[in-house]
Image (cartoon, rainbow, N blue to C red):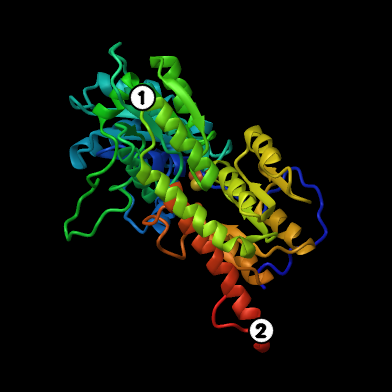
Amino acid sequence: MLLRHTPKDIKEREALTINPAKTCQPIGAMYAALGIHNCLPHSHGSQGCCSYHRSMLTRHFKEPVMATTSSFTEGSAVFGGQANLLTSVENIFSLYKPDVIAVHTTCLSETIGDDIVQIIAKAAEEGKIPADKYIIHANTPSYIGSHVTGFANMVKSMVKYFSLTTGVKDNKVNIIPGWVEPSDMREIKRLAVEMGVASIMFPDTSETMDRPQNGQFDMYGTGGTTIDELRATGDSLATLALGHDASVPAGELLNAKCKVKLYELDIPVGLAATDRFIKTLSEAAGVAVPESIERERGRLVDILTDNEQYFYNKRVALYGDPDQLVPLCEFLVDIGMQPVYVVTGTPGKYFDERMAEVLKGVPGAKFRQGAQADMFLLHQWIKNEPVDLLIGNTWGKYISRDENIPLIRFGFPIMDRVGHSYFPNVGYMGAIRLVEKLLNALLDERDRKAPEEKFELTF
Ligand code: SF4
């Protein structure tokens, strides 16, 4: 009973967050930067921030996460971090030889007010940036937004620094995948190939954050969106931005900068969101949906109709990122479950609007976003009226244990299990995996709790 002090009595809070359902902006910027080919993320702040952000990503992906830091001292906090960043740039290019350094700020450098654009210009002026090498940056103060905001800001920077238009459209479609696993990015690209669509995915962490072990040390991996691909995004036919919070800001900027038509979509989690993704991709690229994809869909519909009785009216509590929660809740509602409690620490009205729409038929559903939409509040709601299932990241295991509720791990971070970076949750195949996880959790629980006379070999 590690959370035994959580009271049932709910008091409105204004200035206190207890166990937030989000993490730091720079973690998102770091993760997005790892989706650029030969890119080294650089944390402009003190060593502690960078160590924390690297360790969170390493624990989730089970891969060594490379990133450098400006290593602020007390002196930098007083006089600013320009000297540290200039020295860092010189050292990084000479020692680690990345194609791109992606600088993100931290609470400290933002509070000091370091002007990164000016520092990058000074680095260029002093000849510290070799030919054909680049520095991009995103401002990521952690006291605003969340890791999702940081991800969005860095993806937007990719457009700001690299996207160009030659004035001649090619036949490619840009896909901004949002904050998803490397396995999800690979699956989205597979679907595009299956449909015969030439695509540019950015960022792309497949083959950087799920690299095979080959006995060789390779600092950057073979994956990631190349600079040439990032430049070419300006000539694409259209952009599919998956996820309002993580992807749409970059899609909007690309549209404003290079006039690339923007389609705003949910991350394709579940049946309906995948249908919308496939339909939009087919429309944007002007291709037909192949039978192979229709058959994948059919397999998902088959497993759903075979098992809908186990999902019916099961109460679920969820926490995580808005871009993931919206399509996931929609899927749960579609299969007869009741997502009754949903919280996200990532602030934004979009979550409220979409959740109101998605959960309008769920009796007693409560959802909240922002600083006080934390794990503590979620636990209080559960204590007042229990649920059958919990879905979210590793932090939920304390509630799961205390309340004796099965937990399905989903989202970021997952530090105590493996598989999430290898098996997709998106697309029809990802939805089949989600169904398997849901069923396993519910049926394991039923078997565990069944009295002897009701314990069945089959289900
Ligand atoms: S909240 Fe701010 S100071 Fe703390 S680790 Fe994150 S960026 Fe660093």
Q: Is residue 374 left or right of residue 287?
A: right
Residue 61 is situated, as x and y percent measured from the top left of the image, at 38, 55
From the viewer's perspective, is the residue at label 1 or at label 2 nearer?
2
Considering only vertical position in the picture, is 386 above or below 104? Answer: below
Q: Which residue is mark 2?
A: 454
Q: Is residue 452 left or right of residue 427?
A: right
Residue 392 is situated, as x and y percent measured from the top left of the image, at 57, 56
Q: Nearer the viewer, residue 455 or 12?
A: 455
The residue carrying pointer 2 sits among few (fewer than 14), some (14 to 19) or many (20 or more) residues within 10 Å by Cα, namely: few
Q: Which residue is mark 1?
A: 119
Image-quadrant location for residue 168: top left
Q: Quadrant of the N terminus?
A: bottom right
Residue 207 is situated, as x and y percent measured from the top left of the image, at 28, 48
Instruction: Give the alpha-carbon distance from disc 1 to disc 2, as whole Å.
Output: 70 Å
Residue 195 is situated, as x and y percent measured from the top left of the image, at 34, 37
User: Residue at point 60% right, 79% down?
Assistant: 447
